Amino acid sequence: MAADAAKVARIVNEMVAERSERLDLSNCKLTSFPVALFKMMKDVVGNIRFVSLQNNELKSIAADFLTNFSQLQELNLEGNLLKKLPDEVKTLTHLKSINLARNKLSEFPHQLTELAALEIINLEANEITEMPLENLNSMPSLKLLNLKSNPLNIGTQLAGQMQIKFELLVSAE
């Protein structure tokens, strides 16, 4: 545990010293984003464009995490234990790509449909059964939606629906 905390502190200290736009805390065994890190990053947090918390043990994302990273363009949360996203994800108005693959989401995160800049949504290998097709079709920038390896009932949902204007990846049954 202490070694993991030291690893996180070292990564954040290096990122701050370099004034990097990237924060990569993948594979750090995090169960939550340590609030104390915001104090360490206070001078650079507004400049961060990419955050990866891939392959941790996150069960939720705190609202203050999302509101602090207001300029975020890419967010990688793949390989965690997330069941839902907080409403504050809507504050990420610059977000272009979100990776939520291999989590525990049973519903499509509807908040994502309100992000006009969002181009890529990866929800592969979750537990999603339905998608808000009409809302997704109205997203101006959406180019790719990956829903492979989800228990979607895609055939009946697409029957009688409008033309999809983005690339939709689903598993062939």
Image: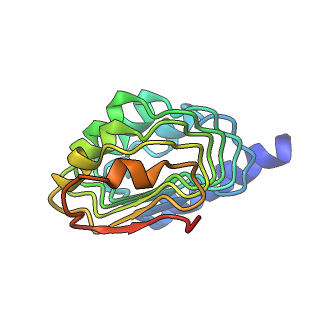
Vertical arrangement, residue 68 with respect to residue 18, above or below: above
Q: Which image quadrant: the C terminus?
A: bottom right
Q: Is residue 139 left or right of residue 84?
A: left
Q: Identify which residue, 86 or 49, lies in the foreground.
A: 86
Q: Is residue 119 left or right of residue 138?
A: right
Looking at the image, how many numbered discs can be counted on the residues?
Answer: 0
What coloring was used for the rendering?
rainbow
Name the residue at 38% across, 45% down. 131
Q: Position of residue 71 (x, y in %)?
A: 28, 52
Vertical arrangement, residue 146 with respect to residue 153, above or below: below
Name the residue at 58% across, 62% down. 14
The picture quadrant where one finds residue 111 is top left
Q: Is residue 50 left or right of residue 72?
A: right
Q: Position of residue 148 (x, y in %)?
A: 54, 62
Vertical arrangement, residue 103 with respect to residue 54, above or below: above
Name the residue at 22% across, 45% down. 135
Q: Identify which residue, 136 or 153, lies in the foreground.
A: 153
Q: Position of residue 36 (x, y in %)?
A: 56, 33
Name the residue at 24% across, 52% down. 160
Q: Identify which residue, 15 or 93, lies in the foreground.
A: 93
Vertical arrangement, residue 123 with respect to residue 63, above or below: below
Q: Which image quadrant: the N terminus?
A: top right
Q: Position of residue 59 (x, y in %)?
A: 63, 33
